[in-house]
Image: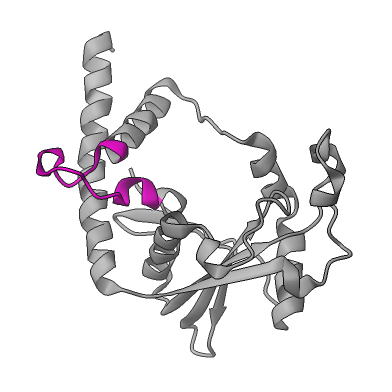
Amino acid sequence: MLIRCSSLAKIMTEPKTKAEGLLSVGAKTYLKELAREEVYGFREELDVRVIEKGRMVEDESIALYNSVFFESFVKNTERRSNQWITGECDIVKFNAAGEALRGVDIKSAWSLGTFPVLPEDCGGKDYEWQARGYMMLWECPEWDIAYCMVNTPEELIKWEQRDLHEVDHIDPHLRVTTRRYTRDLEKEELIKAKAEAAQEYYKTIIQKIKDIHGA
């Protein structure tokens, strides 16, 4: 079991007491959920409309980012993994030698009400750990989290306030907020340690479920 970069923050929370060990109570709860999904063969998704918008407007958000920063990025389709984590990032910029220079993860805000207008509001620790996972996988020195605000597809708006979702009239520069992280090898060592502990705990829980239910 490899930890997805998008879920890294769930296992990286610090325990409140020494008795918890390396993994916090919250991390163990998350791993129990993963184990249950694995045994019973399902995947639960919350905030369906928010997730669906992200999927539907991904190309449009990348185009908005490109227009603001004079880039010509296209969506990355490569998934990378090591023995601890796995991830498929949105954008990677390489030099002529094929070395990663900078990565970008695109987030499509649900509405103007949820769009972060300041860098410090761009996801906090959740997205910081995601960025650090990508930097680890792509051997990249820096990574941006970029929030983009584009029109919400008509079929998703439904009864909501339309002026929070129809934004093409707003200056593109006001519709992209970024936050940059730089690589930290010490934090990557912590990722490795937490991921190894998570893998062991996950296997233990799966076996416990099977033993209790006689599977």
Q: Which of 129 and 117 is in front in this view?
A: 117
Q: Nearer the viewer, residue 109 or 119?
A: 119
Which image quarter: residue 40?
top left
180 left or right, relative to 48: left
- Based on the picture, tell me whether residue 162 belongs to the magenta stretch: no
Going 74% across and 49% down the picture, which residue do you hit?
56
Specify the farthest residue to the right: 169
Q: Give the range drawn in magenta.
A: 8-26
Where is residue 3? Give x, y as percent: 36, 48
Where is residue 48? Give x, y as percent: 65, 35
Which image quarter: residue 112?
bottom right
- Based on the picture, tell me whether residue 15 belongs to the magenta stretch: yes
Going 53% across and 87% down the picture, which residue do you hit?
95
Where is residue 201? Give x, y as percent: 22, 36
Q: Is 27 located above or below residue 118 in the figure?
A: above
Specify the farthest residue to the top: 214
- The quarter of the rendered structure image containing the N terminus is top left
140 left or right, relative to 166: left
Residue 59 appearing in the image:
yes
- The quarter of the rendered structure image containing the C terminus is top left
Q: Nearer the viewer, residue 120 or 1?
A: 120
Going 49% across and 26% down the picture, which residue do you hit?
42
